[in-house]
Image (tube, rainbow, N blue to C red):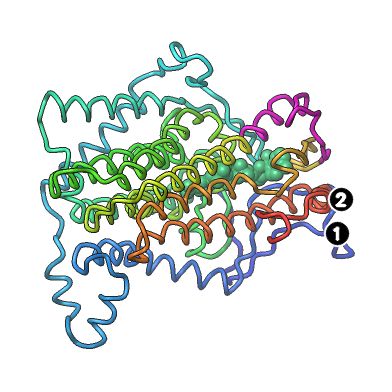
Amino acid sequence: MAAKSQPSGPRVKSPPSSANGHVSQKGQWGRAWEVDWFSLAGVVFLLLCAPFIVYYFIMACDQFQCSLTAPILDLALGRVHLTDIWARTPGLTRVAAQLYAAWVSFQVLLYMGLPDFCHKILPGYKGGVQEGAITPAGVINKYQINGLQAWLITHLLWFANEYFLGWFSPTIIFDHWIPLLWCANILGYAVSTFAMIKGYCFPTNAKDCKFTGNFFYNYMMGVEFNPRIGKWFDFKLFFNGRPGIVAWTLINLSFAAKQRELYGHITNSMVLVNVLQGIYVVDFFWNEAWYLKTMDICHDHFGWYLGWGDCVWLPYLYTLQGFYLVHQPVQLSTPHALAVLALGLVGYYVFRMSNHQKDLFRRTDGRCLIWGRPPKIIECLYTSADGQTHRSKLLASGFWGLARHFNYTGDLMGSLAYCLACGGAHLLPYFYITHMTILLTHRCLRDEHRCASKYGRDWARYTAAVPARLLPGIF
Ligand code: NDP
């Protein structure tokens, strides 16, 4: 076993404080979160219910014309029984299992087998071997960045099949959507369980493991920080990017193909969803090296939250708008479509530029211009697990002077645009903005808790200079 777990019980004290109870001048780094009873209840609830939540949304579209309330009402009024719903739900099929196995194997092959060539031919693109951020144990991992290449090859093959080869129908993903859901769940649980066992028995870096003493919390939030097999197979980078985000645009294309097959044309709402989400996905892969500096890689441990979430939650619930539009096609008026497009593009601009400002600021160590002026800087100190003191800087101008997470605000504007593309007939496609609001608010609070632990009073100086979290004057 890599490290001794703490005595059982839900409360784990971790944030540092001085003898007088105040946050220390110099922060202490590492995953810092107290597993109180409330958090534990949330963890157990999600572990038990999240697969059913995903199933409920897909089933509501498949069997109840995308009404979120109809399944509950019909069950309550005895118009339908659980056994009827279950009997109408397609089970796991051999074809779906073969498709899913081929899909994941192909992505592993692209991830492991092909060194990146995009950085040689695309100016400004950062691919190939890149360094991640320093971990709490003081390790700097190297990553093979070749996601853009994997995305391009996968999509070229998809279009080659659709227009020239004809090996399979482009509606294949939609046609096997529920059987594929069972396969995705099997992989999601298998990889999370393997990651847990690996964390205890053969971790990649024992000093970067975190044991809270609570089994459920460890399973959900992960023990190992950066689990790897061999030198290059990094669980976090692979599972988030490949079966999850490469699939996102393919799934949307399959939904568009199904709409054309069923109704003879593709609606402007479906085009909007494909285009806006396509921009977000391509942006992710174009900036994959930047992704190494985001919370997922820099702070989150790899457990069920990332493992199952990347395999099931992301491909099934982030694509709900396209799935909805197959069942309930919507043709938007031109002003409505243009307003959605504008909101989506402005949201994307804010999201990208705020992330870019922070990246530029950190890369140049503050020697850059933000909105044409030298940046406002807050100098910070923190201590890593080996007791070493490090220096860092926080940006307090540009988008980071408007709010402490304006990048999340841009993301939320884009998310709202995807939902508004689906019109107002049903609540179901609005799940995404609801989920993103909860996810990013929770993420903002988690991040701020961690930053307060890491930077101590220096973080307090930043929050005094920039009081808003997401929206100036509101939150
Ligand atoms: P951030 O990119 O905001 O990174 C937070 C980290 O940045 C902090 O932990 C801190 O790290 C550093 N930091 C915080 N404030 C400052 C500052 N003022 N100046 C310099 N550095 C600062 O968060 P995420 O990694 O969560 O998100 C990255 C993007 O990904 C966001 O735009 C988000 O919207 C998007 N996202 C999308 C999701 C989706 O499902 N679609 C899910 C999650 C994120 P340090 O320790 O280095 O100081």
Along the horizontal axis of the image, is 465 left or right of 189?
right
- Which amino acid lies under the numbered mark 2 shown in the image of this protein? Gln
> Along the polypeptide, which appears first: circle 1 or circle 2?
1
- Which amino acid lies under the numbered mark 1 shown in the image of this protein? Ser
Residue bounds of the magenta highlight? 356-380
Q: Is residue 362 magenta?
A: yes
- Tell me the tag on residue 18: 1
Q: Residue at x 68, y 26 (%)?
A: 363
Question: Residue under circle 2?
Answer: 25
Q: Is residue 348 above or below residue 418?
A: above
Q: Residue at x 19, y 41 (%)?
A: 257
| SS label for mark 1 | loop
Q: Residue furthest top?
A: 120
Query: Is the residue marked by circle 1 packed among few (<14), some (14-19), or many (20+) residues within 10 Å?
Result: few
> Residue 313: where, in percent of width, then height?
37, 54
Along the horizontal axis of the image, is 399 left or right of 131?
right
CA separation in Å, label 1 and label 2: 9 Å
Along the horizontal axis of the image, is 193 left or right of 31?
left
Q: Residue at x 46, y 26 (%)?
A: 145
Find residue 229 and report its image quarter.
top left
The one nearer the camera, 342 or 41, is: 342
Q: Mark 1 and 2 residues: CB-CB less than 8 Å, in contact?
A: yes
Assign the C terminus to one quadrant of the image. Answer: bottom right
> Residue 110: where, in percent of width, then height?
32, 26
The one nearer the camera, 64 or 89, is: 64
Query: Is the residue marked by circle 2 packed among few (<14), some (14-19), or many (20+) residues within 10 Å?
Result: some
> Residue 95: where, in percent of width, then height?
11, 46
| SS label for mark 2 | loop
Find residue 293 and report its image quarter.
top right
Q: Residue at x 26, y 46 (%)?
A: 267
